Image (cartoon, rainbow, N blue to C red):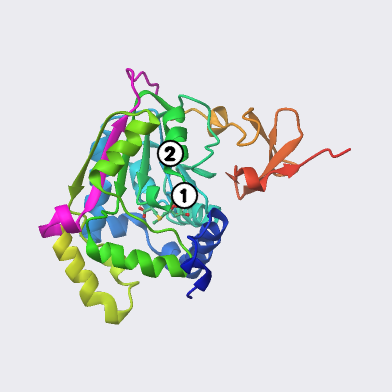
Amino acid sequence: MFKLRHFYRAPNIEEERAFERANIQSKTPRYLETNPFVRFENDVAYKAKVERIAAHLGNLKGFILDIGGNTAGEATILKQQGFNMVVGDINEVALDVSRQRVEKFGLSSPHYVGLDAHNLPFKDNTFSAVTVIEALHHFFNYDQALGEILRILKPGGKLFSLEPNASNPLRRASEVRDRFRGTIEKSFFVRQLERLCAKAGFANAAARAYPSGRSSWKLEEVPAYRRATTRLHGWLSENYPTVFGGLMLEAYKAGELVEQDASDVPLSAVLRSPVNHCELSFDASRRLWVERDGQLGFPDLNGIPVLVAKDAIELNRR
Ligand SMILES: C[S@@+](CC[C@H](N)C(=O)[O-])C[C@H]1O[C@@H](n2cnc3c(N)ncnc32)[C@H](O)[C@@H]1O
């Protein structure tokens, strides 16, 4: 549905969250019936994407945070490959769909956290790597989100991101359409990504174009009248990636990475409140994640902490 108010201003974070929730609710049956591994084996572009991420993660053993993970297909596959994945998204409904799917297919589960990329609910120097896959362009303040990523990375830790390419005229046209649908869709130039990372304090930020192709599974969601154009776009991205492909970014936090195997580390050990930045513990009787002094709590959705500042609940009001 078109929203005319977005002619004057881009969607804000609450509108983005509402859009993402409604979007995933409409697609839940399809997501629940798809085993991520079956998709991985049959969808060439998707397989290449997951393998690209895995290659850039190498043999890291510490926690890896995927921000904007949505239903976490990529992180689910990476988890089965031995990576200690934590998936975060502002849309906790999508995380819950992922949780149900992992349960249904008997897979090993990543950790899930509802979060806002601009205010990450994790302690400093926690993650060996952060992945942001086609999600950075959804954030409304890149400096703030990148500053938060830098804070939670361990020294020597890596940011790996795949993002849309602003040189692509077809992409730019779809961004106009999506703005009126009520979601934040943007894209980047190579140098812009590198400059944003350098400004946030990252070392050795390097971006480049890559052939992103088109997912055959996603193509099935595209209305029939647009499929030929989408296929052509996929072909162009494979053959002329500089203009029609995606952008791939790698950047580091200065220092030398020292990491421990995080397989047995409970998620609660690395969480912190997005409001007062103190530790949180789970109160099973109230099903809330509660700050140390018991004044503020945060919701839990079927075992998923939802640590978004706006969702904080005041407890023990006198
Ligand atoms: C295009 S989806 C990317 C999904 C997935 N990474 C992939 O590659 O298929 C963008 C995701 O970013 C999430 N997102 C948007 N704004 C966010 C924010 N401020 N904090 C965390 N996640 C956010 C959306 O809810 C959505 O799931």
CA separation in Å, label 1 and label 2? 9 Å
Callout 2, which amino acid? Answer: Asp
Q: Does the residue labelled 1 lie within 8 Å of ligand 1?
A: yes
Element type at mark 2: helix
Q: What stretch is highlighted in magenta?
A: 238-262
Side of 198 relative to 66 (left or right): left
Side of 113 relative to 199 (left or right): right
Closest to the observer, 90 or 180: 180
Q: Position of residue 148 (x, y in %)?
A: 47, 34
Report how many numbered discs are placed on residues in the image. 2
Residue pictured at 45% horizontal, 24% vertical: 125
Callout 1, which amino acid? Answer: Phe
Residue at the spot of label 2? 143
Q: Quadrant of residue 258?
A: top left
Q: Position of residue 43 (x, y in %)?
A: 24, 61
- Examine the rendered structure and indicate whether residue 278 appears above or below residue 65: above
User: Does residue 14 show up?
Assistant: yes
Side of 21 relative to 240 (left or right): right
Residue pictured at 29% horizontal, 80% vertical: 224
User: Does residue 262 show up?
Assistant: no
Q: Position of residue 225 (x, y in %)?
A: 28, 82
Closest to the observer, 57 or 153: 153
Closest to the observer, 49 or 226: 226
Q: Position of residue 266 (x, y in %)?
A: 53, 31
Residue 140's disc is 1
